Image (tube, rainbow, N blue to C red):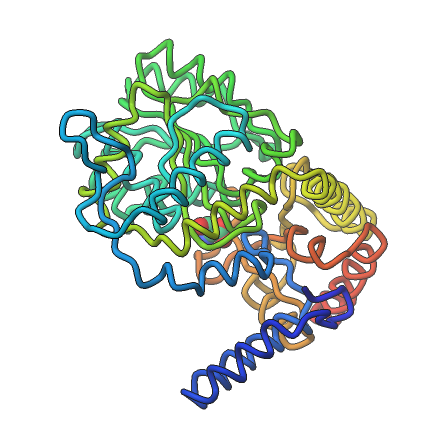
């Protein structure tokens, strides 16, 4: 893994790149460039992280060659396993082990499906369990901090469902009165909580209560904060939500992929909404990576890591506040925060591009009531998960805040 100064204490990636170059100089060289970019840059994208090399190795293993459509469960009626292919003994064991470990991570008896190829596909399947095309779904709007799959008009969610949105109050916090009002007015089949750009605690208990009061199912997309929930640094949605989706590569620091948890009585519906409804063969190599990720998330080291992610985020955000910047909601409780640049003459995109030139990687992001387009934006989103993996502490982030401040001052001249 790279340390904070960009030194890699392992030759794993280098060896892989050399190996790939023997077969394809073009692809190997491009991977090498990306490896060097990741190693040398300060990575502040809130949805990214560096997984362990064990995770990378599992994802590049021979499991990639194996087809295993279906599920590993033993079918009592037929005496067969629920797969459509032979030779699945070992991937069956891996997938079952993966499911067990994820239940342990979140200390839950919810059903878990570890096959979704991504968070978006997990959401696609979870929606199918709760609502029919044309049904009303209440969710957090993308321009207030929600995700593309939470009802954007260009996404399946906005095209298949009748989306209604709640938003944030004048201080940028999720407006729970608005959630209740809209839930009572529109009587949705499904209420969705969770965000891609929201820096505060989400009250899953209250969301669950509102959903129950109006007879809606309640789904949480915990992709961004799943690691914080696993480490006890954010209240858990388990016990409150009917369906919970996540990715495994953000704060959970595993392979690219998705998971769906559900109340046990929804298990069959969830499984058929993943396969055969949304996907064919599961990616058993990624499932092996997810199993390793779960093992890692159960360690004390991981819990200490997440605590440091949150401490770093607060210190980083506080430094921007001290330097006079406006932060959406005025602070952070989690791994990310957003700077409101609406008072400057340049956009989030301009800052992202300028920072790219000096090796600082972050992303432009809409802020609530943004007057600029999603391609331009009046904000940037900043996260601490990747650099904390590389050993950054509070002082390191304070130094980065000052570097970004210098760049902004230069851009404001
Ligand atoms: N696009 C991801 C993010 O950056 O938050 C979520 O899928």
Compare residues 170 and 70 and report the one nearer the observer: 70
Q: Nearer the viewer, residue 202 or 107?
A: 107
Q: Residue at x 77, y 58 (%)?
A: 401
Percent position (x, y) of residue 370? 50, 48
Q: Is residue 371 visible?
A: no
Vertical side of 192 occupied by 20: above or below: below
Percent across and percent down for residue 266 are 29, 23
The residue furthest left is 78
Which quarter of the rendering shows the C terminus?
Answer: bottom right
Quarter of image, res 345: bottom right
Residue at point 18%, 42% (across, down):
277
For the question of whether residue 206 can be seen, the reply is yes
Image: 148 above or below 5 = above
Picture quadrant of residue 170? top right
User: Which quadrant of the rendered structure holds the N terminus?
Assistant: bottom right
Above or below for 254 versus 344? above
Residue drawn at (63%, 73%) of the image: 354
Outermost top residue: 213
Relative side of 364 to 147, left or right: right
Residue 112 in percent (x, y) is at 39, 32
Between 123 and 349, the one nearer to me in the picture: 123
In this rendering, the count of numbered labels is 0
Looking at the image, residue 305 sits to the left or right of residue 176; the answer is right
Q: Answer above or below: position of 13 versus 155.
A: below
Frontmost residue, 362 versus 102: 102
Q: Position of residue 75 (x, y in %)?
A: 21, 30
x 47%, y 35%: residue: 194
């Amino acid at each position: 893994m790279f340390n904070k100064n960009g030194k890699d204490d392992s030759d794993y990636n280098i060896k892989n790149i050399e190996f790939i170059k023997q077969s394809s100089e073009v692809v190997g060289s491009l991977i090498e460039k990306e490896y060097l970019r990741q190693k040398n840059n300060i990575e502040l994208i809130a949805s990214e992280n560096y997984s362990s090399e064990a995770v990378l190795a599992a994802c590049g293993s021979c499991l990639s060659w194996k087809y295993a459509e279906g599920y590993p469960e033993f079918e009592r009626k037929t005496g067969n396993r629920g797969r459509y292919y032979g030779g699945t003994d070992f991937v069956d064991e891996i997938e079952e082990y993966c499911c067990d470990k994820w239940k342990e991570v979140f200390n839950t008896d919810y059903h878990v499906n570890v096959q979704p190829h991504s968070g978006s596909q997990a959401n696609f399947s979870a929606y199918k369990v709760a609502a029919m095309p044309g049904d009303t779904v209440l969710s957090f709007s993308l321009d207030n901090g929600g995700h593309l799959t939470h009802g954007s008009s260009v996404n399946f969610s906005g095209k298949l469902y009748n989306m209604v949105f709640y938003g944030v109050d004048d201080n940028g916090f999720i407006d729970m009165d608005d959630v209740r009002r809209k839930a009572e007015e529109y009587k949705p089949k499904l209420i969705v909580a969770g965000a891609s750009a929201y820096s505060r605690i989400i009250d899953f208990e209250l969301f669950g209560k509102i959903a129950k009061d109006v007879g809606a199912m309640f789904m949480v997309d915990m992709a961004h904060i799943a690691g914080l929930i696993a480490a006890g640094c954010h209240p858990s949605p388990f016990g409150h939500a009917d369906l919970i989706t996540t990715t495994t590569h953000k704060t959970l620091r595993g392979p690219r992929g998705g998971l769906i948890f559900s109340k046990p009585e929804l298990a069959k519906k969830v499984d058929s909404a993943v396969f055969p409804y949304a996907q064919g063969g599961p990616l058993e190599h990624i499932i092996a990576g997810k199993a390793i990720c779960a093992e890692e998330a159960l360690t004390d080291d991981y819990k200490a890591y997440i605590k440091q992610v949150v401490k770093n985020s607060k210190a980083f955000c506080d430094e921007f506040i001290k330097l006079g910047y406006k932060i959406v909601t005025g602070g952070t409780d989690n791994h990310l925060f957003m700077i409101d640049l609406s008072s400057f003459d340049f956009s989030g995109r301009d800052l992202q591009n300028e920072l790219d030139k000096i090796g600082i990687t972050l992303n432009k992001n809409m802020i609530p009531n943004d007057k600029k387009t999603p391609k331009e934006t009046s904000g940037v989103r900043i996260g601490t998960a990747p650099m904390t993996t590389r050993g950054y502490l509070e002082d390191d982030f304070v130094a980065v805040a000052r570097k970004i401040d210098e760049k902004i001052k230069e851009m404001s001249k």
